[in-house]
């Protein structure tokens, strides 16, 4: 199989490598010529074999994705398939599917989780679209997902938009879990009876009910900087938490844990030096390579 991949940043470049390691031929395009295989999206389309061409888009949501979809609509043809694997808002999927559909181009949305560790560990995938389109792309999904049973690292969540909606909720849950770990870190640090906070977190990694990959990453972060002195307590957000709260309000679904985590991030940007928010910042940097502010 031969696919096109648009966007070769932190995740896209790793995805290209993982796909190639699985025997899938990949032609990648990026605005940075130093990492790109071709000079333009037109060249990308021309490099793919005739028939049902498949192009995976892995660029930031919003205008950049809109512009890529618009250009792909001009260089691809009837029967080709575009997968948006970025963190687009689920409402944009309907617009993009209709835009491409007018040219006979098919569309699937894919929520992708795994961050900078996905090259080695695989990516959790949540997809939305027509069953036939999802089946056509399954060799790509299987190459990207973690080893093991497909249903434990891949889900066909529903129709167009369902994949990004599922990923949005996934990220909302992630916000709340990270906040809870951060608050636990601060409380342990505040109590003089606790002599080794990193050891406590490390001891939770096996057998306890709070063990998780996020916990493993927090252990990595505090082993490197036990007091998190190198970080400011400044935590950004990339949009999905806000969108999840908007949906919760629209559907009258109470989400107090997420709302508290979201507002805590806003407070952190007003000059907070909270150890909790330093821990949350460290976690975001560990799993996603997100930027942090050094103290």
Image (cartoon, rainbow, N blue to C red):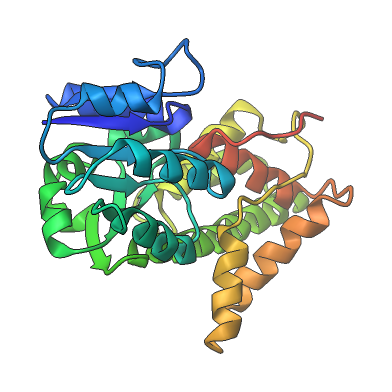
Q: Quadrant of the N terminus?
A: top left
For the question of whether residue 57 can be seen, the reply is: no
Q: Position of residue 105 (x, y in %)?
A: 25, 51
Where is residue 284, by image quadrant? Answer: top right
Q: How many marks?
A: 0
Q: Residue at x 27, y 69 (%)?
A: 159
Which residue in the rendered view is the most extreme toward the top?
A: 34
Eyeballing the image, is 116 above or below 179?
A: above
Q: Quadrant of residue 25?
A: top left
Q: Position of residue 199 (x, y in %)?
A: 54, 40
Residue 257 in the figure: left or right of residue 270: left
Q: In front here: 247 or 264?
A: 247
Q: Residue at x 56, y 50 (%)?
A: 62
Is residue 221 left or right of 135 when viewed as pictured?
right
Residue 68 location (% of width, % of height)? 45, 40
Spot the residue most to the bottom.
252
Viewport quadrant of the C terminus: top right
Q: Residue at x 39, y 57 (%)?
A: 99
Q: Is residue 84 left or right of residue 107?
A: right
Residue 80 showing in the rendered view: yes
Task: From the viewer's side, name the closer residue of 182 and 258.
Answer: 258
Which is nearer the eye, 259 or 103? 103
Position of residue 57 relative to residue 39, above or below, is: below
Identity of the residue drawn at 13% across and 41% down: 52
Specify the farthest residue to the right: 271
């Amino acid at each position: 199989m031969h696919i096109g991949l648009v966007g070769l940043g932190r995740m896209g470049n790793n995805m290209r490598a993982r796909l190639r390691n699985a025997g899938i031929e990949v032609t990648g395009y990026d605005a940075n010529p130093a990492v790109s295989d071709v000079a333009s999206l037109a060249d990308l389309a021309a490099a793919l074999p005739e028939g049902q061409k498949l192009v995976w888009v892995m660029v930031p949501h919003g205008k950049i994705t809109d512009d890529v979809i618009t250009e792909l609509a001009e260089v691809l043809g009837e029967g080709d398939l575009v997968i948006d694997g970025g963190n687009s808002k689920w409402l944009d999927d309907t617009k993009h599917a209709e835009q491409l559909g007018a040219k006979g181009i098919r569309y699937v949305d894919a929520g992708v989780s795994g961050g900078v560790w996905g090259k080695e560990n695989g990516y959790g995938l949540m997809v939305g679209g027509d069953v036939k389109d999802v089946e056509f792309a399954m060799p790509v999904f299987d190459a990207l997902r973690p080893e093991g049973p497909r249903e434990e690292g891949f889900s066909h969540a529903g129709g167009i938009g369902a994949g990004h909606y599922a990923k949005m909720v996934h990220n909302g849950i992630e916000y709340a879990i990270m906040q809870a770990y951060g608050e636990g870190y601060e409380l342990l640090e505040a109590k003089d009876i606790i002599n080794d906070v990193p050891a406590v977190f490390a001891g939770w990694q096996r057998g306890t009910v709070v063990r998780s990959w996020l916990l493993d990453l927090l252990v990595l972060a505090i082993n490197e900087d036990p007091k998190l002195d190198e970080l400011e307590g400044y935590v950004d957000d990339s949009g999905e938490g806000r969108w999840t709260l908007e949906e919760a309000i629209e559907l009258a679904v109470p989400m107090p844990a997420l709302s508290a985590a979201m507002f805590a991030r806003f407070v952190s940007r007003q000059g907070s030096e909270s150890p909790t928010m330093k821990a949350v910042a460290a976690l975001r940097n560990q799993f996603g390579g997100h930027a942090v502010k050094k103290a």
